[in-house]
Image: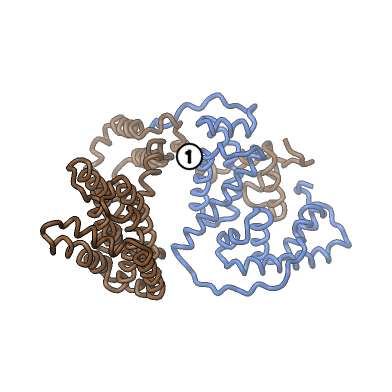
């Protein structure tokens, strides 16, 4: 099976942006180099968000096929962030397809109240890392999932709902509860600052 | 490369790769990887150290690169040639058609799958310029409805050019009265051919769309009028007057008859409605004139037309009729919700 072209000419020296430009010009070798640099962490990140290894694998493949087809659409910026944006959207799409295959009727929950100030942004940006880790460990896994989808992965409420397979209203209420619990957990922690854990990137 | 003041250690990368890193540390690392190419490479390398992800990564790499054929090679014929060549290269696959698919070698199946995917990708590219232009022409023509893109358009041109040929080619004196007598029926026939299962092969689908029914019929009627009004009036202007009313005198009767057809069509269908209105016009104006007096039918027709078309009274009556028909159409538009043949 010799469908592959010989891959040569892209070493360590090329930046990701240069590689993406080469990919946009139809350079398969550049795509291979880009894949070797980024596929590993993308796969690990997808695996953390998706229990089905087959889906994670498909999403990874879709992501790089999309990169191949639309690398010209990359507008500067960090390649890693761009790649993750594609991967996250692909993951949401894959979930939507799955959901269609086995649709579960769920009654939408009422969305409560007004927007709380974005506690998690402030928390993730500014506070002591160990504090956040401990606080995050204290909130329930469902709330953590919602926080991860909306804050870390940068998905919209709708996309997060599709990804997690819950109604949009539930995403909103859970995000609100997560903020509240995080705030409460941090309030308990903040008087006694703890040092960062040994392996942590403090 | 990064604005962060820390970078992932090998230990952190390894723990992220095997999934044992706590959530908060993982989130932080993930955000960092989006911005730091060096750490991204380090973590990717750590993931490749693990056997299971390494296998998946290698397989996906092959699949991705199989689709990443340079664009100049993406021509379907080349892809087909490659697929054929790859089958010929392995003699065992020459019998592939005869062997059940389970028995085939996995590598061959992979090659076939990859080739078929590439072939699919190659059919996707945007339309060439030639197709773009033809679609510019074809789309409005298609949207204009079956009458304008079908036999009706040549029929209109035939009426217009036929009148000119009669006047200047055959030297018939009185082509304009003939044209004026025929003109009001032309848009009515256009309406008859615009909507309904007899006219439109896509009628069942079109009628089921939200814009089906009266809205679609009105759109197509506008197309019909846009073609017939200018062409027939222009032809009339080019003809010698020979005592007949002005070339534009048929416009209001034509409009009134068209609206009457639309009103009736909701109840009895386009074909029957057009037969009633168009036939009514023909029976009332030209047929008696042409049938009654054998000696000078064209003169008689001119008189008849002057009676029904000329003067503010006649035109006012046609205008009133048009307005009344429009009102009746608006009032009876619910009749279009029921589908009739």
Above or below residue A192? Residue B129 is above
Kindly indicate the quadrant of the structure image that contains residue B246.
bottom left
Can see residue B24? yes
Q: Position of residue B25 (x, y in %)?
A: 72, 52
Location of residue A182 with respect to A56 vertically, above or below: below
**Where is A58 relative to B259, above or below?**
above
Quadrant containing the C terminus of chain B is bottom left
> At 32% from the left edge and 34% from the top edge, which residue is drawn?
B80
The quarter of the displayed image where residue A169 is located = bottom right
Direction top: furthest residue: A9
Q: Is residue B311 left or right of residue A151?
A: left
User: For mark 1, what is the residue?
Assistant: B64
Q: Residue at x 69, y 39 (%)?
A: B36
Residue A146 point in image, percent of width and height: 65, 62
| Image position, residue A103 (x, y; %) | 47, 67
Rendered view: B37 above or below B230: above
Where disc 1 sits, the SS reads helix
Chain appearing in brown on the rendered image: B
């Amino acid at each position: 099976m010799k469908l592959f072209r010989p891959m040569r000419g892209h070493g360590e020296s090329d930046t990701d942006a240069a590689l993406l430009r080469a990919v946009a010009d139809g350079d398969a070798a550049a795509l291979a180099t880009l894949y070797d640099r980024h596929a590993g962490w993308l796969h690990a990140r997808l695996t953390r968000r998706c229990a089905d290894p087959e889906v994670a694998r498909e999403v990874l493949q879709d992501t790089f096929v999309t990169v191949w087809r639309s690398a010209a659409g990359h507008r500067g910026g960090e390649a890693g962030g761009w790649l993750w944006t594609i991967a996250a959207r692909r993951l949401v799409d894959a979930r939507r397809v799955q959901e269609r295959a086995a649709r579960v009727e769920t009654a939408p929950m009422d969305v409560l109240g007004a927007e709380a100030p974005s506690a998690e942004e402030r928390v993730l940006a500014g506070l002591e890392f160990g504090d956040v880790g401990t606080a995050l460990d204290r909130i329930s896994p469902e709330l953590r999932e919602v926080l991860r989808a909306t804050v870390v992965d940068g998905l919209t409420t709708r996309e997060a709902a599709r990804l997690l397979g819950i109604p949009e209203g539930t995403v909103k209420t859970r995000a609100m509860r997560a903020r509240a619990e995080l705030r409460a957990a941090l309030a308990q922690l903040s008087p006694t600052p703890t040092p960062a854990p040994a392996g942590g990137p403090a | 490369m990064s604005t962060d003041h820390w970078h992932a250690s090998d230990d952190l990368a390894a723990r992220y790769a095997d999934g044992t890193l706590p959530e908060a540390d993982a989130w932080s690392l993930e955000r960092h990887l989006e911005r730091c190419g060096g750490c991204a490479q380090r973590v990717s390398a750590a993931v490749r150290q693990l056997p299971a992800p390494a296998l998946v990564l290698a397989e996906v790499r092959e699949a991705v690169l199989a689709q990443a054929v340079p664009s100049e090679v993406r021509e379907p014929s080349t892809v087909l040639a490659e697929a054929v060549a790859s089958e010929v290269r392995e003699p065992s696959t020459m019998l592939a058609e005869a062997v059940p698919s389970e028995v085939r070698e996995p590598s061959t199946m992979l090659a076939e799958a990859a080739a078929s995917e590439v072939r699919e990708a190659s059919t996707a590219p945007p339309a060439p310029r030639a197709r773009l232009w033809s679609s510019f022409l074809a789309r409005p023509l298609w949207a204009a409805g079956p009458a304008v893109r079908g036999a009706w358009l040549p029929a209109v041109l035939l009426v217009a050019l036929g009148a000119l040929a009669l006047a200047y080619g055959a030297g018939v004196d009185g082509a304009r009265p003939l044209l004026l007598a025929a003109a009001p029926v032309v848009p009515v026939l256009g309406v008859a051919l615009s909507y309904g299962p007899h006219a439109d092969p896509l009628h069942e689908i079109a009628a089921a769309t939200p814009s089906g029914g009266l809205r679609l019929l009105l759109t197509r009627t506008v197309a019909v009028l846009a073609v017939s009004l200018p062409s027939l009036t222009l032809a009339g202007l080019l003809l010698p007057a020979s005592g007949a009313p002005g070339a534009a005198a048929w416009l209001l009767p034509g409009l009134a008859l068209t609206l009457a057809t639309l009103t009736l069509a909701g109840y009895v269908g386009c074909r029957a409605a057009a037969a009633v209105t168009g036939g009514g016009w023909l029976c009332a104006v030209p047929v008696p004139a042409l049938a009654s007096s054998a000696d000078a039918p064209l003169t008689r027709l001119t008189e008849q037309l002057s009676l029904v078309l000329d003067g503010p009274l006649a035109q006012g009556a046609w205008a009133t009729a048009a307005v009344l028909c429009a009102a009746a159409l608006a009032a009876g538009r619910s009749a279009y919700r029921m589908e009739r043949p």
